[in-house]
Image (spheres, rainbow, N blue to C red):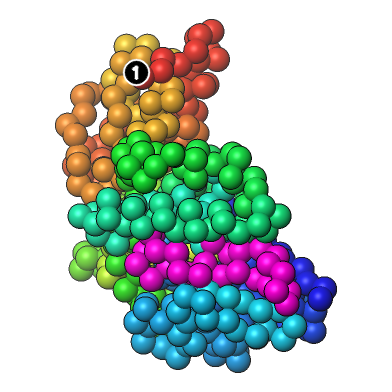
Amino acid sequence: MEFEVVPVVDDGLGNTAWLVALGDGRALAVDASRDLRAVRSAAGRRGLSIAFVADTHLHADFVTGAVDLAAGGARVLASAAGGRLFPHVGLRDGDEVDLGGLTLRALGTPGHTDEHLSFLLLDGSRPLGVFTGSSLIVGAAARTDLVDPDRTEELARAQWRSLQRLVTLPDEVLVWPTHGPGSFCSAPPGAARSSSIGGEKVGNALVNAGSEDAFVSAALLAGLGAYSAYFRHLGEVNRRGPRPVPSVPALAALTADQVAAAVEVGAVLVDVRPVEAFAAGHIPGAVSIPLRGAFATWLGWTTHPGTPLVFVRDAEQDAEEIVWQALKIGFEQLAGELDSGMPAWRSAGLPVSSTSLLSAAILNGRTVIDVRQRSEYVAGHIPEASNVELGQLAEGAMPQVAAGAVVMCGHGERAMTAASLLERGGQPGVAVVVGGPEDWASAAGRAPAVSS
């Protein structure tokens, strides 16, 4: 039977949703997020209606789009063990669903979560490919510490057994994982979005760890890094089922005085403007999170889903993009935005702060705080720079910084977020480096130091 598998990539979260054209005008969507714009656009361009939506597991990094697709008539396919509280077809290991010419078979692959399923796509008895979700991913396997850190090793052992089961499939079977480069669920940087069983048998070091113990102690547990704070509650949101979002809500336009009043009673200001604009002038206490692909990740790490959020943007920035990125991680307390942006705030005569920007070439003698992930820092950093991850700052690990200290990351966006958090925590005056270790190395004519 003719079919087409279309990757729909969310570069910001490092994930891929998969759209399967079933050959009869209908489609299957696998692991689609609540922000369905790209999935629906891909389906619309092909004249497809989405008849099925399958979730491989209770996602921790995005809100499922299954509820919204079900509202449009799609059947939801998911693990019976997931305890979901919204209508779905509960599947167990070995269960099959007739898609109308093609068949989807559920394979129990616990590890990333207890109820994780992979979905094998078959044409008759011939396996075509397998949607592996967060089990087997290209060059790796997804982390096992999100359900409960105390169960990390137990779930890692389950993950090993799941990998070994998957690689018994024929070598030509394609591998369509959800997590990929940029995901905090341990996908390696630079990896492809899809692969094959044969390719993973040859090129995946975790598949070839040699033994369960080797996989657990060396290949997986040693490599887990920090993850965004919102991951800790989103699985339960997806189990209960998010509220449908039939159309994107508009951000309420707030006057400068209304914004000030909202902040007074606990709202958090999120300034989504570019680094240079925030540096030139911002509302004191605002959190800088430049609007880009990774916006949702850092919004989820630096604010709380129950806290009202007020946004500041430039006129050319898309308010709808802000809203969708917030909604796809379960942030729904969107109180509004500053009407007409910073010009309105300045016109009201309210206080404005600024942040100094520095070139990476002029850092000699300054205290440098590198806010990148530990793995990035270890790969190469400026000599004498200390490492405090941005996520640590967001969760309250506020070091006392010396006068004249600067923060840096790879380009400047995370560094500006860090500087805004330090200012919000009572430590204003921290400068931001525009650039990263590579820029410093280029200016200094040397390579960045590499940590041992």
The secondary structure type at the circle numbered 1 is loop
Q: Residue at x 56, y 70 (%)?
A: 119
Residue 423 sits in which quadrant?
top left
Q: Amino acid at mark 1?
A: Ser
Q: Which residue, given by chain and number where applicable, does mark 1 sit on?
A: 452
Q: Is residue 10 left or right of residue 390?
A: right
Magenta span of residues: 107-132
- In the foreground, 284 or 111: 111
Quarter-of-image position of residue 201:
top right
The residue shown at (77%, 68%) is: 4
Residue 66 visible? The answer is no
Q: Residue at x 52, y 67 (%)?
A: 118
Where is 159 relative to 402, above or below? below
Q: Position of residue 115 (x, y in %)?
A: 38, 71
Q: Characterize the magenta stretch by its predominant secondary structure.
A: strand
Residue 266, visible in the rendered structure: yes
- Quadrant of the snapshot with the C terminus: top left
**Figure check: 176 above or below 70:** above
Q: Nearer the viewer, residue 189 or 38?
A: 189
Residue 29 among those drawn in magenta: no
How crowded is the residue under tag 1: few (<14 C-alpha within 10 Å), some, or many (20+)? few
Question: Residue 354 appears at what percent x and percent y?
Answer: 36, 39
Residue lying at the far top of the rendered structure: 445
> Quadrant location of the N terminus?
bottom right
